[in-house]
Amino acid sequence: MKNLQFIIAILLFPLSIWYAVGVAVRNLLYRCGILKSHKSPIPTIGIGNLRMGGTGKTPHTEYLIRLLEREKKNSISLLSRGYGRKTKGFLSTSDNSQFSIFNSQLLGDEPLMMHHKFPDLNVAVCEDRLEGVQKLSSFKFQVSSFNIVLLDDVYQHRRLRPDLMILLTEYDAPYFNDHILPFGNLREFRSGCQRADIIVVTKCPPLISDQRRDEYRRRLRLRPGQQLFFSQIDYLPPQPLFDDCPWSTPREALLVTGIANPEPLLRHLERHFTVRHMAFPDHHPFSAIDCRRIVDKFNRIKSPEKVIITTEKDAMRLANGGAKELLADLPIFFIPISVSFAEGDTFDQTIKNSVFGVK
């Protein structure tokens, strides 16, 4: 398998050169001011990565939402591209004149999940992030305008320059060990990390030695003023996808995922029971055929003590439309996740200082 991956990487290397040239020219045009980066009319926090998917943007965005909501000093909005949605242009969950009920086809699965988890949060989607924040700056919700906007997956959207930029990189797959697409998984050169104000190493083990921290600090090549933090994923108790489905610890589980990197969740579940894994592409729209395959695979598990487990993102798509009709009678649970920062990290205080001027 490794030999095959090496051969494919070698074959893709010429394409990486052309992709790299395109990225370099684009970044040069922004650096020279030929292409313009614009400041938002309202305060913004950007979160993104250099690598294609799997670094934990969604749980870190949730963490920021909870942190900012605790302050109760500003109205918060989340602006996303809305990957996978069937609509175009600007949509906001606070504009009830557009749609009374939002689904993943209108917003995309991740914004829909945020809408369900944070009912008081305005979730907006727009392909053009600059246009999105301009509309949010004048958008009225109840009695106040939105004056802090979280920008999801915005790192390569150079037209908009956030007030604070957070770059995520995964502990087991840091960008300093990767290469540019399609030879590797980087969307742009490693030097793009210089645009970040904060770098977070995500999905860390619970305990990191000072020696290991120093190694990452050295290899990440932080510029003066950049701050480095370390976070880990915390898996929360399983929740039923459909009502009235009690959890009893199973012997076997069918894991169904449509995310970029399901390996950490798979390793977590394998500590507790036997797991069979059905992996679909990232943001996969589950069809009736997919659901029948899931049902068939589940029925072939002989143990009576069995469940289907999925991610919180995938749950949004499995609970919609025809998929729900095919799966509603099965014991399906999703695993919510959260993040926590290493003991002694001052991430919360750093965000408060940047946004609120708290000392």
Image (cartoon, helix red, strand yellow):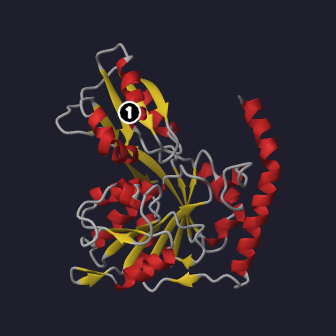
Name the spot of residue 139 as percent of width and height, x first: 33, 82
Task: Note whether 108 is above or below 193 in the view shown.
Answer: above
Name the spot of residue 233 as percent of width and height, x first: 44, 47
**Extreme top residue here?**
302
Q: Is residue 190 left or right of residue 306?
A: right
Q: Is residue 270 left or right of residue 25?
A: left
Amino acid type assigned to the residue bearing label 1 in the image: Cys
Q: Is residue 246 left or right of residue 156?
A: left
For the N terminus, give its image quadrant.
top right
Q: Is residue 10 left or right of residue 119?
A: right
Q: Residue at x 25, y 67 (%)?
A: 120
- Place residue 323 in its image quadrant: top left
Q: Residue at x 78, y 46 (%)?
A: 12
Q: Residue at x 49, y 52 (%)?
A: 56
In depth, the one of 40 and 237 nearer the eye is 40
Name the spot of residue 33 as percent of width and height, x first: 69, 85
How many circles with numbers are drawn on the protein? 1
Q: Which residue is mark 1?
A: 291
For the C terminus, give its image quadrant.
bottom left
- Place residue 60 in its image quadrant: bottom left
Per the image, label 1 sits on a secondary structure element best described as helix
Whether residue 267 can be seen here: no
In depth, the one of 291 and 341 nearer the eye is 291
**Extreme left residue here?**
244
- Place residue 77 in its image quadrant: bottom left
In depth, the one of 285 and 159 nearer the eye is 285
Name the spot of residue 216 as percent of width and height, x first: 64, 54
Task: Note whether 255 is above or below 56 in the view shown.
Answer: above
Q: Residue at x 75, y 66 (%)?
A: 22
Badge 1: few (under 14), some or many (20 or more) residues near its Cα, within 10 Å? Answer: some
Task: Note whether 135 is above or below 121 in the view shown.
Answer: below
Whether residue 178 can be seen here: yes
